[in-house]
Image (tube, grey):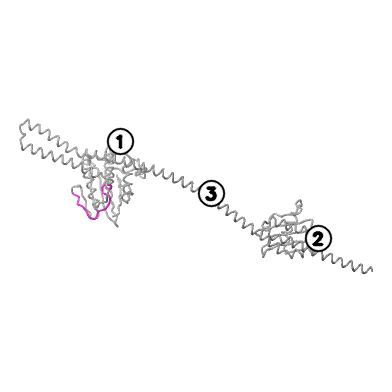
Amino acid sequence: MAMDLTSNNGETGKLAVTDKRIADYAMVLDLLGSLTELTSEKVVIESIIGLFRSLCAPSVVIYIPVIDDLPVEAIVFPVTLDAKPLVKDIIGNFHDDYSMKESGSGFRLRIKYGEKLLCFIEVEGIAFPEYNYHYLNLSLHIVNVLALSIHNARTYESFRREINERKQLEIELKEKTIQMEELNRSLEQKVRKEIDARRHKDQLLIQQSKMAAMGEMIGAIAHQWKQPLNSLSLLILDVKDAYEFGELDAGYLYTFVERSMKEISFMAKTVDDFRNFFKPSREKETFDLIEITSEVFSMLSSQFNTNDITYRITCRVHNRTFFSYNDVIPCEATQITTYKNQLAHVILNIINNAKDAIIDRRQKGLLGALEKGVIWVDCDKKDNVLRLEIGDNGGGVADGVKDRIFESYFTTKTEDKGTGIGLYMSKIIVEDKLGGKIHLRNVDNGSVFTLELSV
């Protein structure tokens, strides 16, 4: 009877062990079902620690995450435990996939997804050490599920971070877009204001340029008229003398009228020439660059004579030099099709400045008493580009101001002689209206302005 009892007790013990194992597997399977659905690694870690606590009833559970092959801060149960020595030992000495603790009441695991290490787990102080192998064996059965859960959570969090980053980038992009649109609107307003201001400034400069040109024209006409007015004055005085001496006959009157009309015609032609010269060209014309230059010298000839200034015009294409506007022979090689009067205005500005520089140099005593002022013009053509150089012996432009010579309102002349808009407008005309280039260089005792125009 006792044996039967013993036998029955043995069978009862085996049944109890089997029932525990079945219960353990059922609990693990139940927990694993929800574990793989979790999307937060923190929650997965808490669930894994909770799983081992429920399964093994240990006194210590240590979970050490490994991210990019580097261990990070361990999660420990209980939280008050100083697990630093254990963590150091796990990281430094545990290299297998699993091992039993020497105490016989715990084990260690390495959780990997494929070849990628995800974490270390240590379970210590199991309440029923006799089931240690059972718990380890059960853990090894579920280790792949644990790895999958951790991997899934990390992947999901990575996707979520990426999505959040993209959303943040979209928000920032939207904000930047709004800022850029506001900046563009503000910039457009500033640009419009600046354009309006520049347009107003240009209109003012054009008007001032017209007034300056008109002043130059009146001054040039006055110089041109001096000689014929003197001649008319002498003719009129001679009429009085002729009357007193009884010489006032039909022949005298005829000669008087003829000579007077000649002078008056010259004066009228001078006014017409200047008026036509300063009238802006509305359409392009074909003309000779050398000939238009000679016309400028023609209008300024009286001032040149008064100030002892000579000039020459050279055609480099045919190596011909002219010392008077009356001697100039038109040249087909130096013809150009462009806005005639605008270009003539530029040439007049440069030659006028050369004349003023020579006069200023003479007044300062820098030009010898017997030394003449000289203005020279060279015209050449190469590769469909006409090149006109206008030079003088007026002393040149100081290096400190040479780079500013084409700025608006900048002048090296005294206030009563210069406005600072002549060369500025010349540059605008040459580069914007005529599509050419203009630049300045110094030479011995003078300067050279160069115009380059495509033909």
Of marks 2 and 3, which one's residue comes earlier in the chain? 2
Label ID, residue 416 = 1
Q: Give the range drawn in magenta.
A: 327-343
Q: Position of residue 222 (x, y in %)?
A: 22, 38
Q: Mark 3 points at which residue?
A: 175
Q: Is mark 3 on a helix, strand or loop?
A: helix
Residue identified by numbered label 2? 105
The stretch drawn in magenta includes residue 455: no
Residue type of the residue flagged with mark 2: Ser
Q: How crowded is mark 2: few (under 14 residues within 10 Å), some or many (20 or more)?
A: many
| x and y, in percent, of residue 274 in the image | 23, 43
The amino acid type of the residue labelled 3 equals Glu
As measured in the structure, the alpha-carbon distance from the residue carrying label 2 to the one carrying label 1 is 110 Å
Q: Is residue 240 above or below residue 372?
A: above
| Quadrant of the drawing holding the C terminus | bottom left
Pick whichever of labels 1 and 3 is earlier in the sequence. 3
Q: Does residue 291 sit above or below 17 in this rendering?
A: above
